[in-house]
Amino acid sequence: MEELTNRIASAATLQDVANLSGVSLSTVSKILSGANNFKDSTINKVKSAAEELNYMPNVMARQIASNSKNRIIGYLIPNLFNSYYSGMASTLESYLYQHDYELTICLFNDDVNRARAYLHFLTEIRASGIIFGSFNEPECLKDIDIARKYMPIVSIQADIENVDRVDVSDYDGTYEIISYLIKKGHKKIGFLGYQYDTLSILSNRLNAYKDALKDNGIPFRSEYVVDYKQTPNSGYIMANRLLNLADPPTAIHCFNEYIVPDVYGAIQDRGLSIPDDVSVTAFDGLRLGSVVRPQLTTIYGPNDAMANTAVDLLLNRIEANYSKKPPQHIIFKHTLMERGSVADITNR
Amino acid sequence: MEELTNRIASAATLQDVANLSGVSLSTVSKILSGANNFKDSTINKVKSAAEELNYMPNVMARQIASNSKNRIIGYLIPNLFNSYYSGMASTLESYLYQHDYELTICLFNDDVNRARAYLHFLTEIRASGIIFGSFNEPECLKDIDIARKYMPIVSIQADIENVDRVDVSDYDGTYEIISYLIKKGHKKIGFLGYQYDTLSILSNRLNAYKDALKDNGIPFRSEYVVDYKQTPNSGYIMANRLLNLADPPTAIHCFNEYIVPDVYGAIQDRGLSIPDDVSVTAFDGLRLGSVVRPQLTTIYGPNDAMANTAVDLLLNRIEANYSKKPPQHIIFKHTLMERGSVADITNR
DNA sequence: TTGTAGGCGTTATCAA
DNA sequence: TTGATAACGCCTACAA
């Protein structure tokens, strides 16, 4: 009676299957790869031998021998507490699966060294492509340059030179929602961001904030802009920085959406209500915006479309054999979603 | 001037490096693997040639030749919208990194076929081990049986026979929090679960719910138990099922925590307040319990400890060469976290 | 319909 | 201090 404890069987090889079924190795190889031009009896012998031995092809050996590409796509991301990334991952996986690719999610937990390690990893296993999540780690640039010699790379809202890239209209979206707040009577508007100086999506959004204020004759107040490192509770900390001001804002715009529940918490912990005391807006359009109460007025970015397009761009490169077509930059249009988190204070 | 468009370089091989540096292939191999017993000049020649060619070892070839293990651990999970999984993934990655292993997160988006595909994938690339997330897909059992012949497997709250497993005290924890609700005067207590007939963590928790009622002389009412498939908004749907009852419960216990924000939303959408009109409890102890308002009274399971222990168990199997030690089952003790989501209604 | 033999990129053994 | 050469597990002409 076989014990089912955790141990490795001497992983069967093609040769083992060949021995057991009494045919040659190459016959086994062909049959197991789906060849039909063999006697039924041979096919059956081989298949049942493989079954019996639980033969699983060694994909590495196969790739080396046939010099074929694997179908592994890596998605490199800094964290998963921001559901932006998990949502993206889910969409990417679904779409890649339709194309018969496997997604491997490489989570580097905000550690550049690990980001680099995963880049090396993906390069060394000769993955077929890499999708960059939205993050900014300049120290990776050299590793990216090496990786790109081995496989195509696509960026989803990340600053990498000379690769295909998808984005949402950061500037326009932010400009629109800040203008919207102003139209609702808000003049004291806070902006919560991150410490990512060189990340263009942040600077785009921050510039839009400034421009919208300026175009409406509202002076910029630096104390209304808070940034902080990205941590699970950064929203709470940043919101409190604003709420602690002697003259706190009447509206808070969040650079991205995952901090919103914490911002809500910070406001509610002071006994203030949303939107009557403080209005809140954000950018992203994640599901959580419809989960919080009041539901969030936000700028929706079509993340599913972005993810799918990123895959399309990547697979084009892969399957068109790394064509030299210049890098594409596709920008999706945002949508303003009016829900319940903004008060009209024009009459106050 | 070199074009930096997205293309593959003819990935350099050892032979290329050898040619460029004018030494033999095997010398290059040794030097690039860190051998010191060569002339400095040779070492330098080789290293700079490798650098120049952006040589990256082909890990597959390396493994085949040396028949060494890779350091890939797969984490197989059904979704990422439940932050239970993303939190686990993050902890696993951090701990594995300390041990110099790479985590590859395999998200199968609730599709058995994809779960099976990822199992095959991990087996075919000869990953060093697999960590099973908490889910129940009986159709995978055969594939698991094959996979386990190639590498050790550890389960985190998943029903798989004969593998190492970590758990939290489901029964006791649920029993405690239901008893707690009863002590607070609640007699009408709803239970929100899932359609996972054979998942032991659900049946454990449900049995504890029933037993706690019984032991306190409260009759079981089947209409107070709602289950539904696991979707992003299942909490909203399930909560409404309870709230629509002619005689709705005064307290709702959630089998797990990620549905809590939706349950809150469902309650608040009726103008009801938590905990005055409806008390809410749950099981997990995720961060989101402290993000919602009122903060959630819940059963905390030590997920970080579970994750780390799962890794320990797995690495023991791997590094002790798949020992035949019988499967371990380690159960962590829960903790009741009293926060603000339960009202005392004994005097009503 | 089946088998032989060479090769994929690497490591490892042994000789020079 | 270096370099042939035989593996590793598999694929694929080409031959039989």
Image (cartoon, coloured by chain):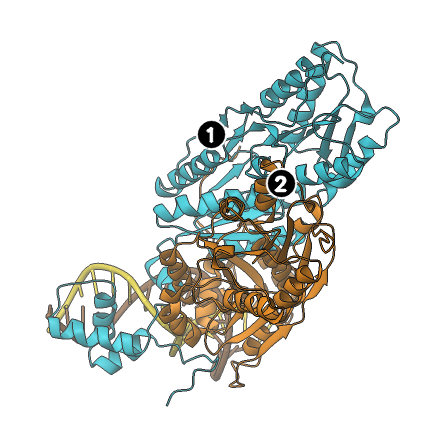
Chain colours: A cyan, B orange, C brown, D yellow
Instruction: Work out whether residue B27 can be spotted.
Output: no
Disc 2 secondary structure class:
loop
Instruction: Work out whether residue B327 can be spotted.
Output: yes
Measuring 66% from the left and 65% from the top, which residue is drawn there? B179
Judge the density around disc 2: few (<14), some (14-19), many (≥20) Cα neighbours within 10 Å: many
**Comparing labels 1 and 2, the label whose residue is closer to the camera:** 2
Separation of marks 1 and 2 at Cα, in angstroms: 19 Å
The image shows residue B93, relative to residue A294, as above or below, that is below
Disc 1 secondary structure class:
loop
| Left or right of D10 in this view: B173 | right
Q: Earlier in the sequence, mark 1 or mark 2?
A: 2
x%, y% of residue A323? 39, 36
| Mark 2: amino acid | Phe
| Left or right of B136 in this view: B167 | right
| Chain ID at mark 1 | A
Residue assigned mark 2: A135
Residue assigned mark 1: A328
| Mark 1: amino acid | Gln
* Front residue (pair A257, C11): A257
Split into 4 quadrants, where in the image is the C terminus of chain A? Answer: top right
Measuring 18% from the left and 77% from the top, which residue is drawn there? A45
x%, y% of residue B326? 52, 85
x%, y% of residue B5? 48, 35
| Left or right of A197 in this view: A101 | left
